Image: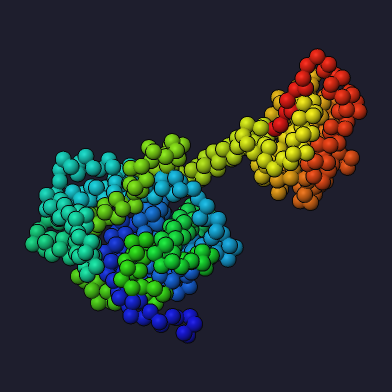
């Protein structure tokens, strides 16, 4: 037991867990209401995801529960499935199962490879969506239909015909959550203070929409179901929830690592999040992930181990069993104000303020992902962002590799000995040396053959040396590019020499039939041997350079 539960930080875990639970309560109610499943579903999600993710996860100090990004997707699922609970929560269960598979298969280390502009773009887009969905509610109106566009279309009507009492409560809530002093937050979190004060003020008003009756007691078991008409919708939504929850959780884990100077276990964390979401789905809780703000609060108030996350859930369970009737008096405008602050905090303002000083492409990528997130859908935004970022990165690497091969930077002569340099000078413009550096990407391979043809003069260059000494591996594209170079050299009457081919590269050449174009007599272990062989062939076939150019100096060597 002591190996599984570390009791050495029990006092801090108690304070951290209880404080995180207090912070989580208004957010869970607000997220539940925003999701369409009801405020109690938000609390159930915080209880179940928070407890099991802490118990089985790989980030001891992390607090899990409903988060803004997850709610945006889940609300769309709830609306698209017409509120059919068996289908909706089947989606949550399937998302949890997918997360468990991610962890078992070791995908945790790859999910974190999403480029920062993509993460910034979709997180900021989600923040904009959360704010857009709550604007009309601040004025006492309820948008007709789900989604960002209906919510935005309702805003002009809400502004021109406001419910003044609801608006007053909403403005009061906004003022408190944005202006609450950080020093006071150690004792009473701003969202909880706004929840208490806003609800108390609304009790003296007569026309403020409130949550209404909230179920009490333990959650009921929900049997998931699927049909042929909905299986694709459910699977697609579950995959989005699983990926988003994984990214959200692992980013929060990195924040926790920075604060605690520890290192989380990404795959174990995915398994814990998956177990929590499976449990939430079976008992009517909305899906969750690692929650950054609640995790930070937990750590700052002493939480160190998984006990803090489990205590946070037990506190919420006590609230559900005892205080649920009081929650029925909470106005929609109060929860809307709290969620507007949540959306504002999600938007990556720190990057946006400085983005004009960084790479323009990264800013354009971030804006593209943000726009797709708000106006199309999250999965399209993330996929498009990752693809564009990957293509741009490959293009950048390819340009760098081609520049090195072409001798356009200092890498082309790196490591050349005096003897090798002398050989190149002796051969003049009859020998071209290509220094292929690093893993030869398919982006560079696409233009390598054409690039070599451009660099070799039909009249002067009679020998070509390809140096693979710093190429650890090749893919099919690179192998085919080398094959093209060999064939072009043979057709043009040029002599090709290669050196430094390791076993892995040689195996690829052999397996793909390129070795027949690279016979053993032109392969050499090192660069000096290849350059010497090329020099000898030049002199044997054409005589010395002085005889060939009696009235001129030998040309400079072509180093690429």
Residue at 67 percent of width and 40 percent of height: 414
Residue 116 location (% of width, % of height): 46, 48
User: For this rendering, which residue is in front, 132 or 529?
Assistant: 529
Q: Residue at 77% of width from left, 26% of height from top?
A: 428
| Coordinates of residue 328 in the picture (x, y in percent) | 21, 66
Question: Where's the C terminus, which quadrant?
Answer: top right
Q: Pinpoint residue 284: horizontal percent, then vertical percent.
A: 38, 67
* 287 vs 560, nearest the viewer: 560
Report the residue that reaches farthest toward the right.
Answer: 540
Q: Looking at the picture, does residue 192 appear above or below residue 114?
A: below
Q: Residue 116: in sight, yes or no?
A: yes
Residue 141, x across and y down, in percent: 21, 49
Q: In this rendering, is residue 448 above or below 122?
A: above
Whether residue 40 is visible here, answered yes or no, is no
The residue shown at (19%, 44%) is 158
Asked if residue 538 lies left or right of residue 167, the reply is right
Please say if 436 is above or below 56: above
Question: Seen from this angle, which residue lies furthest bottom?
Answer: 1
> Total label count?
0
> Which residue corresponds to the image point at 18% horizontal and 48% vertical from the top-left?
139
The colour style of the image is rainbow
Residue 523 sits in which quadrant?
top right
| Camera-nearest residue between 518 and 546 | 546
Along the viewing direction, whichever of 449 and 218 lies nearer the viewer: 449
Position of 53 with respect to 504 (left or right) is left
Quarter-of-image position of residue 458: top right
Q: Residue furthest left?
A: 204
Q: Image check: 233 left or right of 15?
A: right
């Amino acid at each position: 037991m002591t190996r599984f539960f570390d009791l050495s930080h029990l006092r801090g875990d108690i304070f951290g867990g209880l404080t995180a639970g207090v912070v989580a309560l208004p957010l869970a109610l607000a997220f539940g209401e925003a999701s369409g499943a009801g405020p109690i579903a938000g609390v159930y999600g915080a209880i179940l995801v928070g407890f099991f993710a802490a118990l089985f996860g790989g980030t001891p100090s992390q607090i899990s529960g409903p988060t803004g990004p997850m709610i945006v997707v889940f609300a769309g699922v709830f609306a698209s499935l017409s509120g059919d609970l068996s289908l909706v929560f089947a989606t949550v269960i399937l998302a949890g199962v997918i997360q468990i598979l991610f962890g078992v298969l070791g995908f945790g280390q790859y999910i974190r490879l999403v480029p920062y502009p993509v993460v910034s773009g979709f997180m900021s887009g989600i923040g904009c969506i959360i704010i857009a969905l709550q604007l009309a509610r601040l004025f006492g109106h309820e948008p007709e239909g789900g989604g960002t566009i209906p919510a935005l279309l309702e805003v002009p009507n809400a502004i021109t015909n406001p419910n003044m009492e609801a608006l007053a409560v909403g403005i009061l809530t906004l003022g408190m959550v944005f202006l609450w002093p950080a020093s006071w937050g150690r004792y009473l979190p701003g969202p909880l203070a706004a929840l208490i004060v806003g609800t108390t003020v609304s009790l003296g008003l007569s026309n403020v929409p409130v949550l209404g009756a909230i179920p009490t007691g333990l959650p009921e078991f929900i049997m998931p179901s699927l049909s042929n008409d909905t299986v694709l919708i459910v699977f697609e939504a579950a995959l989005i929830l699983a990926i988003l929850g994984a990214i959200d959780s692992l980013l929060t884990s990195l924040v926790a690592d920075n604060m605690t100077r520890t290192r989380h276990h990404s795959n174990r964390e995915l398994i814990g999040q998956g177990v929590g979401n499976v449990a939430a789905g079976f008992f009517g809780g909305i899906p969750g992930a690692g929650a950054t703000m609640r995790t930070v609060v937990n750590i700052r108030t002493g939480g160190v181990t998984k006990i803090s996350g489990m205590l946070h859930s037990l506190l919420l369970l006590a609230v559900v069993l005892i205080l649920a009737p009081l929650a029925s008096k909470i106005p929609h405008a109060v929860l809307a104000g709290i969620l507007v602050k949540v959306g504002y905090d999600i938007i990556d303002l720190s990057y946006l303020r400085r983005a004009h000083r960084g790479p323009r492409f990264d800013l354009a990528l971030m804006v593209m992902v943000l726009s797709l997130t708000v106006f199309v859908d999250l999965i399209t935004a993330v996929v498009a962002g990752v693809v564009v970022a990957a293509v741009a990165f490959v293009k950048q690497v390819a340009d760098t590799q081609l520049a090195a091969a072409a001798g356009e930077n200092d890498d082309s002569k790196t490591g050349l000995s005096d003897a090798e340099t002398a050989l190149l000078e002796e051969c003049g413009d009859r020998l071209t040396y290509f220094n292929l550096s690093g893993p030869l990407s398919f982006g560079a391979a696409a233009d390598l053959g054409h690039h070599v043809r451009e660099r070799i003069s039909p009249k002067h260059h009679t020998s070509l040396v390809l140096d693979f000494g710093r190429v650890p591996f090749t893919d099919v594209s690179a192998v085919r590019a080398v094959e093209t170079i060999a064939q072009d050299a043979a057709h043009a009457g040029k002599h090709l020499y290669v050196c430094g081919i390791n076993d892995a590269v040689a195996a690829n050449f052999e397996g793909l039939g390129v070795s027949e174009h690279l016979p053993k007599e032109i392969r050499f272990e090192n660069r000096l041997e290849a350059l010497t062989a090329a020099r000898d062939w030049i002199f044997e076939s054409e005589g010395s350079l002085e005889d060939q150019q009696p009235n001129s100096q030998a040309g400079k060597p072509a180093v690429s």
